[in-house]
Image (tube, rainbow, N blue to C red):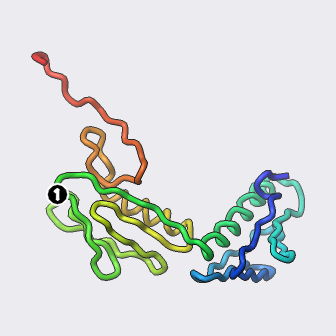
Amino acid sequence: MSRIGKLPIEIPSGVTITVDPDWITVTGAKGTLKQFTMPGITVKQEENKVIVTRENDEAQNRARHGLMRSLVANMVEGVSKGFEKKLELNGVGFRVALAGSGLKFNIGFSHEVNYALPQGISATVEQNIITVSGISKQQVGQVAAEIRALKKPEPYKGKGIKYVGERIIRKSGKSGKDK
């Protein structure tokens, strides 16, 4: 039995789950999320818990069992609390500002870089910290990765966009004879 898949998911108050044969819909204070049910996996709601089971012990179904449980648990957490990722902008003259429903970056290029935020994702900017938040864990992580990819931190001075708490391994640079 999957260690993750066998754990029941607690449903907090204010969250409703609808289980259809093909779809699972989770509704909460922050919004609604839908996920299709994988073949070979059964999702049942019992009182204030959701239980995910599998039909048999085939390798494919064993792999899907823990994944389906994690997806449903993340949907429950997303509609009740939400998810957020923080990014930090390092570099002299590097700036970011909210521009309508997107972000406008000055990150060392000859032009400004505009990033349009997808629907369901919001961002806040405080000095050089960008906070990306939303109800879908996958979408928040994807947007944060796309923003980081605009200017990855370089290994010599650490200039660029990095996650808060991310450790950038530095290189020493040139070593001259006279030093």
Which residue is at a point 69% across and 66% down the rendered structure image? 73
Which residue is at a point 39% across and 72% down the rendered structure image? 123
Image vertical order of residue 18 relative to residue 69, above or below? below
Q: Is residue 179 left or right of residue 41?
A: left
Which residue is at a point 35% across and 81% down the rendered structure image? 101
- Percent x, y for residue 156? 26, 38
In the picture as drawn, the residue positioned furthest to the front comes out as 13
- Percent x, y for residue 170? 32, 35
Image vertical order of residue 66 relative to residue 79, above or below? above
Label 1 sits on residue: 93
Who is closer to the viewer here, 113 or 31? Answer: 31
- Percent x, y for residue 45? 83, 76
Q: How many marks?
A: 1
Q: Quadrant of residue 58?
A: bottom right
- Percent x, y for residue 172? 26, 29
In the picture as drawn, the residue positioned furthest to the right comes out as 56
In the picture as drawn, the residue positioned furthest to the top comes out as 177
Q: Is residue 72 left or right of residue 177?
A: right
Who is closer to the viewer here, 16 or 43? Answer: 16
Q: Could you classify mark 1 by the number of other residues whose Cα lies within 10 Å: few (under 14), some (14-19), or many (20 or more)?
A: few
Which residue is at a point 37% across and 62% down the rendered structure image? 147
Mark 1 element type: loop
Image vertical order of residue 176 relative to residue 63, above or below? above
Q: Quadrant of residue 5?
A: bottom right
In the picture as drawn, the residue positioned furthest to the left comes out as 178
Identify which amino acid the numbered label 1 is placed on. Answer: Gly
Q: Quadrant of residue 126?
A: bottom left
Q: Quadrant of the C terminus?
A: top left
Who is closer to the viewer here, 74 or 138? Answer: 74
